[in-house]
Image (tube, helix red, strand yellow):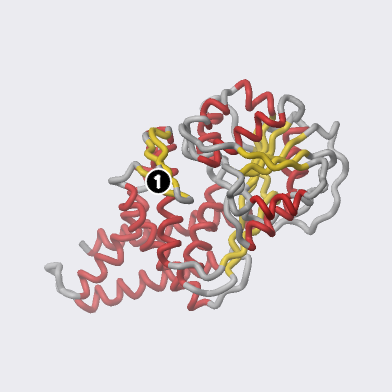
Amino acid sequence: MKTFFVAVALAELVMLLALYLSGKAHVLAGAGRPYQRPAMLPGEPRAAMIIAVTGDSPAMRAGLASLLAQDYPNLRYVLVTQDEIDIAVPFIRDLIGVRADAVHLVSGRASTCGQKNHNLLAGVAHVGDEPEILIFCDSAHVARPDLARLLVEPLADGRAMLSGGYHRVEPLDERVPTLGMVNVNIALHSLQSIIPLPWGGAMAVGRKTFEEHGVARIWAENIVDDFSLGPHLAKRGIRMRTVAEACLSTPLSDVALGGFRDWLVRQLLYLKFCTPEIWLGSIAAVALFLAPPLLAVLGLIGVFPERAFAWWLAGAAAYLAGLTAVGLAFRRLSPRKVRAWAWTKGFFATLLMTAWCYFITWPTFTMRWRGIAYRVTWGGRVVEVLHNDS
């Protein structure tokens, strides 16, 4: 049992350290070079930015204001809500004002897919055939002024047919749930350097690619936009061109433990629904998160035949020291400085919460978000949409 403990403890440390080393440069590049108005793009293809919106918050207001301040010439903006009574509508109308390049659109209720997908498809239909490039952005992240340019550039010069960035969570406090979300965000951001798929935030795709590869058909029955688009196009030989600098900022504070749990469960459910093979394989990582600390505790209380308390004490101490050191390495990737002790608590909580949330995803095929429940099956296909008042 001692040998097994050493093996799984080392495996966990190596896995996490490999993730840190492979993703470090990509995540830090997400901080971006200082903004400078770039040179004109070749031909400057016509583009439209479509944003699904719901609710109202300071983060959303800041995010939408930054998206509507892009320096890309002749960019069309379409902000889409489900209905006229969404509390986002008054702010959207104030923000758009009399601008000729922006419009607010009402999509109606989704019945066969996620409401966000339904909103995005309504925006795509509204802009028609004019835009050569479609840009899709989340509404609650703050964008740099050249985000649209950064996303369009690899499509305009022929390097890619799909491009995307990500977002960095900036902790405004040192509460454990806040830092837990920061840790998960950094892990996903690091994975983007290994798995070139859309991971949320912003992405751009050529209109021709969108039409020829049936993206609208996929979205019209799927629970999520980015996580369905990436694997669908990858199967057709189209990989995303990751633009590290096309990274949005997400200031975050006062996260409740339940909010952290619900958010993480949704991320894992997207994984389960859209890429079940990766979700099943993730059980190995979850086992590595749980096995070493469990074995260390059992050894310390004398459960195993060796009853070598001194050995288990030394082994547990070495394991905790190594894991703490790896966790503090990830602290270097945080957009804001966090005290070592606070970060360590958030890091360890993330490992435990990830394991717990992963187990939560096993028995369920229902996802709840923004007052709507979706029954989902394999491939991310929505079977039924249930509204609160239905």
What amino acid is found at the position of numbered circle 1 in the picture?
A: Met
The residue under the point 12% across, 68% down is: 305
Residue 292, given in percent of the width and then of the height, sits at 30, 63
Residue 66, given in percent of the width and then of the height, sits at 73, 54
Viewer-side residue, 233 vs 64: 64
Question: On screen, 85 above or below 31?
Answer: above
Q: Residue furthest top?
A: 212
Q: Is residue 55 left or right of residue 261?
A: right
Question: On screen, 329 above or below 217?
Answer: below
Packing grade of label 1 (10 A; few <14, some 14-19, many >=20) is many
Q: Is residue 294 left or right of residue 329?
A: left
Question: On screen, 378 above or below 338?
Answer: above
Examine the rendering and report whether any part of residue 302 can be seen: yes
Q: Is residue 166 left or right of residue 128?
A: left
The residue under the point 86% across, 51% down is: 37
Give the tally of numbered discs: 1
Viewer-side residue, 110 vs 254: 110
Which SS class for mark 1? strand
Q: Quadrant of the N terminus?
A: bottom left
The residue under the point 65% across, 35% down is: 123
Q: Quadrant of the C terminus?
A: top left
Q: Is residue 205 left or right of residue 233?
A: right
Residue 145, given in percent of the width and then of the height, sits at 78, 52
Examine the rendering and report whether any part of residue 29 can be seen: no
Q: Residue furthest right?
A: 39
The residue under the point 59% across, 71% down is: 172
Q: Residue furthest left?
A: 305
Residue 380, given in percent of the width and then of the height, sits at 43, 35
Viewer-side residue, 206 vs 114: 114
Residue matched to label 1: 367
